[in-house]
Amino acid sequence: MESTKLSDDHSIQTKQPKKKDPKKFLRLVTIVSTFGGLLFGYDTGVINGALPFMAKPDQLNLTPLTEGLVASSLLLGAAFGSIFSGRLSDNKGRRKVILYLAILFFFSALGCVIAPNIMLMITFRFLLGLAVGGASVIIPSYLAEMSPSERRGKLVTQNELMIVTGQFLAYVFNAVIGNVFGDAGHVWRYMLVIATLPAVALWIGVLILPESPRWLASKGRMADALKILKQIRSESAAEQELNEMKAHISEQKKMEKVKFKDLSIPWIRRIVLLGIGIGAISQLVGINSIMYYGTQILQNSGFGTKAALIGNVANGLIAVAAVIIGMSIMHKVNRRTMFLTGLIGVTITLIAIGITTLMLAESPILPYAVLSLTVLYLAFFQGAVGPLTWLTLSEIFPARLRSIGMGIAVFILWICNFLVGLFFPILLNGIGLSGTFFLFAMFGIFGVLFIRKYLPETRGLSLEQIENNFKAG
């Protein structure tokens, strides 16, 4: 009997080293899942360089209106994708929905590549938007649920970094393909087809992704949740976290969720309106006019198409650098101060672009001045306004309000994104570059006043303290 016990103990000891390192496995999970963010970035950024070639008479022959529809149809799809994917993931599970998104990314991206006319291009871009919107909601949620509390902020913001990295890669591939194959008729199709590669990588990667332990626990599958937690935590931490989940689920069952009729309660209405304002402002200052139409802006300033594609790479590079810097300081300075600083910088830069295009019209230095100012604009936006938008939205909504509040705020954010994408080519054609950027600057001024008056400081406060502050008015 004793020898059997020793034999069993020896067996356990020899098998123990084979257990996966929780930190390494969690890092792998983060990298694989954020391929969704990379796809998000590439698919929103690639249109920047593809549109000038796509618009040619011998290709899709786009007008300013149809150009706007091609670019913004993805954003309209994203608005709806962000709404429906959350509920779908609650029912089917985070992992399964990420798999669905990978498949949708692949086939809709392929559809854009082979689209023979404007109508099919807009249709496939809309379907691609459903995947982008779904990724914008599911990937951060999945990462937040997989991460230990002390690393949650760092791991969740990795997705934001992957988004701007995807956009940067899109600009690089656009520049290379545009300059090497620029004389080929279907060069824009070469740019679009690259998006299918990370979609395949995400689909294959999903095979190693575990399901969210919090989703499993919410469905009463505690044993399965503990098994996953032991893969990404130490033994003791896994047990402790499962107990916390059980307590939280029990507490949530007692808590009455906010319904639409509850929006008449002043403090709840105040939070939702603040979320809507933050979402709208983050888009109406024109960030995605640069991310989607940066090549056209530089062309309008005086660069040729190939030079504009190369210049636009600088926009992508500064966006990545600014997000990295923003991520490193956002937990060290006050949220409200950083948000206001970013918005003020964005607004001043927009005004400067408007004045520069008026004063230096026809000047050979205009394209270089505009490129320098768009780089400065992106430094302020991606370093402060962009990261703070998502962080603030995640902090101001209490748990029982988060589902409906975030749903409304993110939907408005995507709709405003859609409107900027749709009307920018029309505005550029109608009131010119200076007039368009002066309009964005007006929204920036409104945003500074709005944030200054209505956004409370949330740094260092618990969610309960933030909720109590709103209740107290």
Image (cartoon, grey):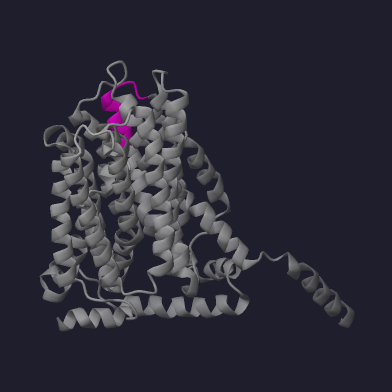
**Count of numbered labels shown in the rendering:** 0
Q: Quadrant of residue 224?
A: bottom right
The quarter of the rendered structure image containing the C terminus is: bottom left
On the rendered structure, is 21 left or right of 426? right
- Span shown in magenta: 115-126
Up the image or down, 187 lies above or below 452; here it is above
Up the image or down, 365 lies above or below 465; here it is above
Q: Is residue 215 visible?
A: no
The quarter of the rendered structure image containing the N terminus is: bottom right
In the rendering, at what x and y percent does residue 437 appear?
18, 46
* Residue at the outermost top position: 58
Up the image or down, 108 lies above or below 20; here it is above
Q: Main secondary structure of the magenta part?
A: helix
Residue closer to the observer: 199 or 6: 199
In the rendering, at what x and y percent does residue 416 appear?
20, 49
Residue closer to the observer: 219 or 288: 288
In the rendering, at what x and y percent does residue 6 appear?
85, 79
In the rendering, at what x and y percent does residue 32 appear?
53, 52
Q: Is residue 15 visible?
A: yes
At x 18%, y 45%, the residue is 354
